[in-house]
Image: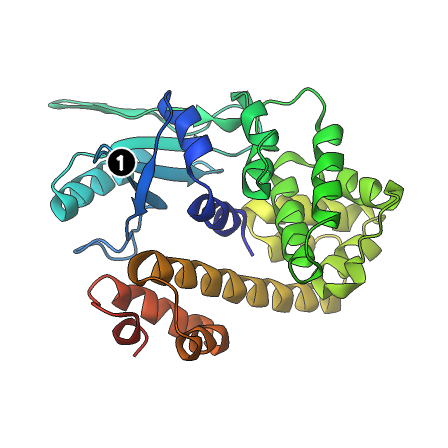
Amino acid sequence: MRYDTTIKELLLDRPELLLGLLVGEPVKVSRVLTTELPKVENLRPDLLFELADDRIVHLELQAQPVTFFGHRMLSYRQRIWETYQRVPLQIVLWLGKGPVRIPDRISEPGLDYSYPVVNLQEVDTTELLESPFLEDNLLGMLGRLVDYRPAVARLLRRIANTEASKRQSWLAKLVILSGLRSLVPAVKEEIERMPIEIDIMENEWLAEIFHQGEEQGLVKGIEQGMVKGMVKGMAKGIEQGMVKGIEQGMARGRTEAARGILARQLERRFGPLPANLARRVEAADLETLERWSLQLMDSTTADEALR
């Protein structure tokens, strides 16, 4: 499961606090728009939100430099306008460590185009951390904090008190996002110090991470892999068999995340899913989920989208 999939899932559930910080004013999201834009091949914006005042916010997540990034943003702008007949408010959220390493404009003969790039590490996310919702709290952990350990400890206490059926999912999200801030060792230490038990052995992927966390190569591989490709980073510090196990865990995580995102998109568009359709989503593989996601834009019913 990659960091961007995790952040998208959190924002699909609770977008308004973070969007308000980025836009500079309180906002009300009326709906999440499909990112399947016509005429775009292998180029899809990360998140599109329609606000109550009819503005469209395009939020792009980035943690690494990308060649011709400005031209990609310009392509998104054009395709969004063609699809919704509205010029989007575009914001890039820099999630990487250190200074921003992507441009915020294109300046060429006959073309002057810009968009704000917000370094989340420099944003005061106190409001997110104090929110009663874990989605906000996890996103707030990526903001400007003098000491991350109290935030990690508070998150772990809240996760420990959630329903047992959801606890491992929340813990996995915390570990994934902690890789963006080099906090995997801190998460491990806080779990060991907690008086409330969190049984990481219930999750095969988490158990392997924490069992081997004392080995410097594995910890470094996890932190680098969260952003750059987990398998490649881990291969430097662990044996081939462990890599295979984590690859399998990552594949399962991507499929579970895709199921959750598709289910939310279907419910936002068509209302609560009937039990038979919910079971189809839960049983689908990643390839099928991607095909259904592409069909969703042109479907008039949930049943039609899942054919």
Secondary element under disc 1, as helix, strand or loop, is loop
* Image vertical order of residue 294 relative to residue 131, above or below: below
Relative to 257, 263 lies left or right: left
What x and y, as percent, mark residue 283?
49, 78
Q: Which of 202 and 118 is in front in this view?
A: 202
At x 47%, y 65%, the residue is 259
Q: Using the image as rendered, state which of residue 12 and residue 29 is in the foreground.
A: 29
Horizontal relation, residue 75 to residue 281: left or right: left
Quadrant for residue 26, please give it.
top left
In the picture, which quadrant includes the N terminus? Answer: bottom right
Examine the rendering and report whether any part of residue 146 can be seen. yes
Residue at (49, 38) in percent of width and height: 63
Q: Which residue is drawn at 44% across and 73% down?
A: 278
Q: Where is residue 252 in the image (x, y as percent from the top left)?
A: 58, 68
| Quadrant of the snapshot with the C terminus | bottom left
Image quarter for residue 271? bottom left
Residue 282: give x, y in percent of width and height. Answer: 49, 73
- Please name the colour scheme applied to the rendered image: rainbow
Q: In this view, does 121 lie above or below 7?
A: above
Q: Which residue is drawn at 75% across and 46% down?
A: 219
Looking at the rendered structure, the number of numbered marks drawn on it comes to: 1
Q: Circle 1: is it few (<14), some (14-19), or many (20+) Cα within 10 Å?
A: few
What residue does disc 1 label?
A: 52
Q: For residue 235, say whether it is visible.
A: no
Name the residue type under label 1: Ala
Q: In which quarter of the image is residue 290?
A: bottom left
Q: Where is residue 27 in the image (x, y as percent from the top left)?
A: 35, 30
